[in-house]
């Protein structure tokens, strides 16, 4: 937590006193602790560890790929737009991913459809393709 404050907060807010930095450290400790507890609760609903890892990687890698491509393909992009797009992209993918874990599709949505043609009025005629065999 102290690394986060020293590397990200202190350079942005240069006029902070030691007491303010200490309060920020405590506040971020509570925030990161709550975040870890929340992630543990979500992970308990995800099933296997591999499925959880793949889900989290999928949720995070989409916005990261978008940020990478933005930097590679557009010269006029700036840090504010990139950060805004990254945050919105992460929020949307986390919303969809966590929502899919908390509210999985019902069994009627995931059962395969029947493959029988019973009850069809039009018969299914299949004509084989004639093949030629080489003459020897």
Image (tube, grey):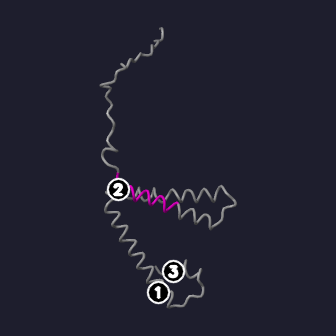
Secondary structure beneath dot 3 equals helix
Residue 24 is situated, as x and y percent measured from the top left of the image, at 48, 83
- Relative vertical location of residue 90 with respect to residue 14 in this rendering, above or below: above
> What residue is rendered at 36% in x and 55% in y?
51
Tag nearer the camera, 1 or 2: 2
Q: Earlier in the sequence, mark 1 or mark 3?
A: 3
Residue 14 is situated, as x and y percent measured from the top left of the image, at 60, 85
Q: Quadrant of residue 33?
A: bottom left
Q: Quadrant of residue 111?
A: top left
Q: CA distance from mark 1 to mark 2?
A: 38 Å
> What residue is rendered at 65% in x and 55% in y?
73
* Between 99 and 69, the one nearer to me in the picture: 99
Q: Magenta part of the protein: which range?
A: 89-104
- Label placed on residue 103: 2
Task: Using residue 121 as the reference point, say whether residue 94 is left or right of it.
Answer: right
Q: CA distance from mark 1 to mark 3?
A: 10 Å
> What residue is rendered at 53% in x and 81% in y?
6
Tag nearer the camera, 3 or 2: 2
- Relative vertical location of residue 32 with respect to residue 133 in this rendering, above or below: below
Would you say the residues marked 1 and 2 are in contact, meaning their CB atoms lie under 8 Å apart? no
Q: Residue furthest top?
A: 136
Residue 37 is situated, as x and y percent measured from the top left of the image, at 35, 71
- Label placed on residue 5: 3
Q: Earlier in the sequence, mark 3 or mark 2?
A: 3
Is 93 inside the magenta-drawn segment? yes
* Between 104 and 62, the one nearer to me in the picture: 104
Q: Which residue is mark 1?
A: 23
């Amino acid at each position: 937590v102290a690394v986060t404050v020293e590397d990200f907060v202190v350079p942005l807010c240069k006029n902070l006193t030691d007491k303010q930095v200490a309060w920020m450290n405590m506040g971020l400790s509570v925030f990161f602790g709550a975040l870890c507890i929340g992630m543990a609760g979500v992970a308990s609903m995800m099933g296997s560890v591999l499925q959880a890892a793949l889900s989290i990687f999928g949720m995070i890698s989409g916005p990261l790929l978008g940020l990478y491509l933005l930097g590679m393909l557009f010269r006029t992009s700036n840090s504010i737009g990139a950060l805004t797009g990254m945050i919105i992209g992460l929020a949307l993918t986390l919303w969809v991913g966590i929502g899919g874990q908390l509210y999985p599709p019902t069994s009627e949505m995931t059962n395969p459809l029947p493959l029988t043609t019973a009850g069809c009025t039009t018969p299914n005629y299949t004509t084989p393709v004639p093949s030629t065999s080489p003459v020897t």
